């Protein structure tokens, strides 16, 4: 099975979960015998990837993949880009157009059996590849514009591209039932064209000799020793993540039970607003803002926590909840988070329901038995979720399509 | 006896210990809050001190010395915070020696204040008194003089403070000469605070002070460039038939707020000469002015007035919830901290009371989009707040870990 995968990023050049998901999915598919040509919009080394062939659609660096912007002429000379190139690649639309041109050419060389695209950024290229090669198109939806904006607003151009991609797809893969519902309800796509394949987690990546270092969050450890419960979230501080409700709920929880501390790991445009809100609620010294965390500080943020909260207003999947499960956190997540479809030993609440979130936090913090049960049970559940299953589902979809069993 | 009319020149010198980029990961691991390693940032206290020494303290001390030598009638009053003296001792001892030479002339008065340039008066009267005492002791030790006149941080003042200073035994206190308080009266007299016995009050003539402190180098100002003749004329017309003109400003006005290339040093030298060229003119220290003139009336300031901003209040320090929280946290530790008798810990706790820390958390200009008015070594008031809060947590940790006192309250 020859698969032409059209993506936007792969580790280590990823800015978020999309690159991680593409990497693990491709790796698992390759193990199942798929021959994969993976296209990214930039040129860079991918030292840990030898199970597939990576193609670069432009000579831009990974950081320039959303467009060159107002770069000075020196950059241009260094890159030996022609004047026409610089003009074309100034913004993301330019990069996307170049990506389409590259695919038109590539698709005649690699002769795929199926084209598999990830999210709106490469949907246009997927549509064109399908036209040129005459093979089926799978559109994999990790997030829609409705999720990213946490509302019905959003960029109309992006909505239009998503709509075209979903119409032209022979099969659609949604990362959760929540995402499938959005595709059906917001874009009017027939439900039977859409398959739900939940993301997974690769614990061999997490098991790589990691040892928790209790000095990273030494003060939080000292608080724990004093009987405090640590509640964490590891996320981008954007409107999609529902963090204003989270901070309000923290204040409500603290008014009932004050041996709590909240670890806010991450960064984003909402940070200042959240700090201000914490101060206004009089709980600033209960909130620990770390800034952007990576490596040890990122892993240890899970390890130090007792409770992990995913407060998203709209979360197509939510890989961090699986990471938290791996680190034996008790998990509270919104009903609007897709990962809730694969985890049962968790508390679920509606993202706006601050009272319920506060109540669950206090409930777990004041009952050792409840906390331990949640922590141990979710760990068992997460063990059952694997990228191999994702690969099996994808291979089945590819196979059905090539046999003409497409919707 | 015909008393000469005089200028009371009062200069305030202060540099804070700024908190470094102190993250969640530093808490309980590193206790060096004031030790920014990055030399390229204004959070680096040594770097800033050396810069201000070079641009302001050294050239202004040289000018003051020259004026004292040249004019027997020249006088100046100075306040130097304890935390600035500490920094001079570490990084510019020769500059501190220069200050001492000025004081030795007997014509430079040192004014009392809180050692830590804090807002303790509004949070803990006991801690406030300890800091005033600490400053008095430091001035006695370094300069060999007794302070007799008091100023509070940011020239914050109210009736209660005046009453306190009177009871404490100060002969004078200074404040802003703010129009809504003075109404029809002139700031150019010696006054007495209401409900006090022995203390006198001098009020800043803010128009003539700010002409130099804020406007001197402003090319957009209608009076720019200001020359010494014009300024002398303004003072002459202001003081006509009155006693004193109180010119109060930051010491750093000279060379730091107004750079040398504005001509500020030459201007001031020339102005002092022109003022003293008139035989009925002189300079007074604050104490001399109080000794020379009787109070002409009582001043009632029930609400706190400062020399800051157009509002003349403390909103730049206490205006938002981050600032209020920060101060609430730090002052709530008082009893536990003092009980430890751990001098390093007590000193760090007091350095965290320096008013500049909460000033950097001020959002009143930041949120207006007028970020140019935000003078701060931090990226934003929110960053300032986070680093500070983490330092407070570390103080709590030391209290808890080293002394088994206090609580790790989040």
Image (tube, rainbow, N blue to C red):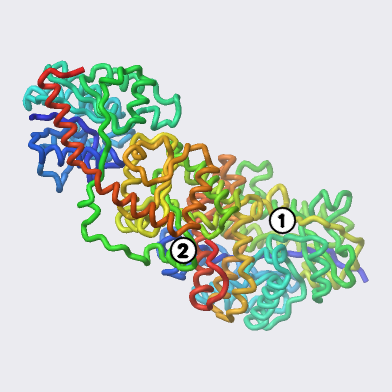
Which residue position holds label 1? B307
Q: In terms of secondary structure, where does tag 2 sit?
A: loop
Query: In this rendering, would B134 be left or right of B57?
Result: right
Could you say which disc has been placed on residue A33 in the image?
A: none
| Nearer-the-camera pick, A38 or A338 | A338
Query: In this rendering, would A121 be left or right of B6?
Result: left
| Nearer-the-camera pick, A151 or B141 | A151
Q: Position of residue A159 (x, y in %)?
A: 36, 22
Marks 2 and 1, how far apart at CA: 27 Å
Q: In terms of secondary structure, where does tag 1 sit?
A: loop
Mark 2 chain: B
> Which residue corresponds to the image point at 14% horizontal and 31% vertical from the top-left?
A395
Mark 1 chain: B
Residue A128 seen by the camera: yes
Query: In this rendering, would B57 be left or right of A49?
Result: right
Residue B95 seen by the camera: no
Mark 1 crowd level (few <14, some 14–19, many ≥20, 10 Å Cα): many
Indicate the quadrant where residue A405 lies.
top left
Query: In this rendering, would B332 be left or right of B157?
Result: left
């Amino acid at each position: 099975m020859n698969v032409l995968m059209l993506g936007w990023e792969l580790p280590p050049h990823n800015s978020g979960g999309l690159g991680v998901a593409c990497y693990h999915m491709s790796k698992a598919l390759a193990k199942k015998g798929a021959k994969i040509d993976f296209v990214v919009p930039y040129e860079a080394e991918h030292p840990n990837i030898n199970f597939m062939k990576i193609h670069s659609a432009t000579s831009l660096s990974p950081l320039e993949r959303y467009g060159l912007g107002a770069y000075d002429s020196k950059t241009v000379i260094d890159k030996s880009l022609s004047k026409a190139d610089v003009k074309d690649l100034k913004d993301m639309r330019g990069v996307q157009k170049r990506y389409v041109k590259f695919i038109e050419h590539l698709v005649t060389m690699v002769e795929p059996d199926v084209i598999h695209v990830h999210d709106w950024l490469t949907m246009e290229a997927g549509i064109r590849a399908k036209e040129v090669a005459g093979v089926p198109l799978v559109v994999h939806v990790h997030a829609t514009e409705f999720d990213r904006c946490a509302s019905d607003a959003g960029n109309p151009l992006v909505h239009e591209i998503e709509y075209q991609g979903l119409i032209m797809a022979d099969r659609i893969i949604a990362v959760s039932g929540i995402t499938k519902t959005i595709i059906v309800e917001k874009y009017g796509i027939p439900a039977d064209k859409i398959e739900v394949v939940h993301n997974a987690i690769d614990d061999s990546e997490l098991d790589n000799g990691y040892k928790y270092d209790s000095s990273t969050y030494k003060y939080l450890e000292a608080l724990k020793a004093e009987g405090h419960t640590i509640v964490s979230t590891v996320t981008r501080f954007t409107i999609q993540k529902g963090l204003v409700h989270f901070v309000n709920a923290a204040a409500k929880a603290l008014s009932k039970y004050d041996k709590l501390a909240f670890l806010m790991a991450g960064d984003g445009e909402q940070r200042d607003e959240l700090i201000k809100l914490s101060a206004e609620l009089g709980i600033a010294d209960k909130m620990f803002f770390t800034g952007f965390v990576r490596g040890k500080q990122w892993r240890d943020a899970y390890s130090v926590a007792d409770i992990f909260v995913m407060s998203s207003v709209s979360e197509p999947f939510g890989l961090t909840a699986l990471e938290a499960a791996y680190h034996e956190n008790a998990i509270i997540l919104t009903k609007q988070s897709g990962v809730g479809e694969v985890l049962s030993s968790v508390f679920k609440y509606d993202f706006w329901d601050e009272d319920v979130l506060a109540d669950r936090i206090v409930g777990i913090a004041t009952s050792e038995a409840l906390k331990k049960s949640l922590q141990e049970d979710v760990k068992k559940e997460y063990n059952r979720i694997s990228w191999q299953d994702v690969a099996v589902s994808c291979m089945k979809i590819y196979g059905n399509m090539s046999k003409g069993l497409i919707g | 006896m015909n008393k000469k009319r005089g200028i009371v020149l009062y200069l305030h010198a202060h540099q804070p210990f700024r908190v470094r980029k102190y993250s969640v990961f530093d808490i309980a691991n590193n206790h060096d809050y004031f030790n920014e390693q990055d030399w390229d940032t204004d959070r680096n206290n040594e770097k800033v001190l050396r810069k201000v020494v070079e641009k302001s303290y050294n050239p202004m001390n040289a000018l003051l010395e020259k004026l004292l030598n040249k004019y027997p009638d020249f006088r100046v009053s100075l306040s130097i915070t304890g935390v600035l003296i500490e920094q001079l001792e570490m990084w510019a001892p020769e500059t501190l020696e220069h200050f001492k030479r000025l004081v030795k002339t007997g014509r430079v008065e040192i004014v009392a204040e809180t050692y830590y340039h804090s807002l303790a008066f509004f949070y803990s009267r006991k801690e406030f008194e300890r800091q005033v005492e600490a400053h008095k002791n430091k001035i006695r030790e370094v300069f060999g003089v007794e302070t007799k006149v008091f100023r509070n941080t940011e020239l914050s003042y109210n009736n209660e403070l005046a009453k306190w200073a009177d009871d404490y035994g100060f002969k004078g206190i200074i404040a802003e000469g703010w129009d809504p308080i003075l109404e029809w009266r002139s700031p150019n007299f010696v006054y007495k605070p209401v409900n006090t016995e022995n203390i006198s009050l001098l009020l800043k003539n803010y128009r003539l002070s700010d002409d130099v402190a804020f406007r001197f180098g402003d090319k957009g100002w209608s009076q720019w460039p200001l020359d010494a003749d014009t300024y002398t004329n303004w003072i002459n017309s202001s003081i006509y038939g009155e006693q004193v003109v109180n010119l109060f400003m930051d010491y750093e006005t000279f060379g730091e707020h107004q750079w040398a290339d504005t001509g500020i040093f030459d201007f001031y030298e020339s102005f002092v000469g022109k003022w003293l060229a008139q035989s009925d003119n002189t300079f007074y220290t604050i104490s001399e002015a109080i000794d020379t003139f009787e109070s002409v009336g009582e001043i009632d300031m029930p609400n706190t007035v400062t020399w800051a901003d157009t509002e003349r209040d403390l909103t730049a320090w206490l205006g938002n919830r981050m600032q209020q929280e920060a101060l609430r946290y730090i002052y709530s530790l008082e009893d536990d901290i003092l009980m430890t008798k751990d001098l390093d810990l007590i000193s760090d706790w007091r350095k965290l009371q320096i008013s500049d820390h909460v000033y950097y958390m001020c959002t009143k200009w930041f949120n207006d989009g007028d970020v140019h008015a935000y003078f701060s070594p931090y990226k934003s008031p929110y960053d300032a707040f986070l680093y500070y809060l983490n330092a407070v947590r570390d103080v709590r940790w030391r209290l808890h870990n080293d002394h088994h006192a206090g609580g790790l309250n989040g």
